[in-house]
Image (tube, rainbow, N blue to C red):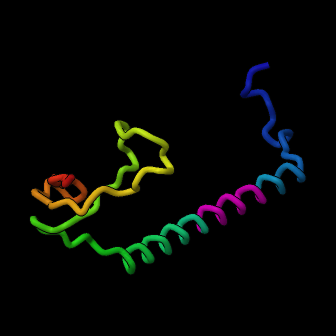
Amino acid sequence: MPVDHLKKNLLTIHPTAKDFHDMWQRECDTSSRCIAEVKEYKRQRYDETHREPDLREGDQVLVSTLNFKNLKGQKKMRNSFLGPSTLIILIGKNELEVRLTE
């Protein structure tokens, strides 16, 4: 039967399905609003507490050994940091070149 012959008023939505759809939409809106509020709160807290590292050439820094793959021995027995090492060049915000001491 062609679509244009169907009567529009014969197609109805079951009340329970409509209630479920409305409830689902309310919950989606509520969760979206809550996520936006949490993002804003986290952004404000980060902005309040974060400070950029104040590093200059010649400063003494510690180097983390967390991602070093060439160290021997058990991980829990190794030192977590090497240093103090002298900072040679600041390459970027989070990238620097150091002179490792023995």
> Residue sitting at 70 percent across and 57 percent down?
25
Q: Is residue 64 shown left or right of residue 3?
A: left
Q: Is residue 71 shown left or right of residue 55?
A: right
67 and 75: which one is in front?
75
Main secondary structure of the magenta stretch: helix
Task: Point out the stretch of residues depicted in magenta.
Answer: 22-33
Determine the residue located farthest toward the bottom in the rendered image: 48
Picture quadrant of residue 4:
top right
> Residue sitting at 75 percent across and 55 percent down?
24
> Residue sitting at 34 percent across and 55 percent down?
64
Q: Is residue 37 above or below residue 88?
A: below
77 and 99: which one is in front?
77
> Residue sitting at 35 percent across and 57 percent down?
81
Q: Is residue 34 shown left or right of residue 68?
A: right
Residue 43 horizontal/vertical position (percent) = 43, 71
The magenta stretch spans residue 29:
yes
The magenta stretch spans residue 64:
no
Residue 12 horizontal/vertical position (percent) = 85, 44
Residue 48 horizontal/vertical position (percent) = 38, 80
Q: Is residue 72 above or below residue 37?
A: above
Picture quadrant of residue 69:
top left
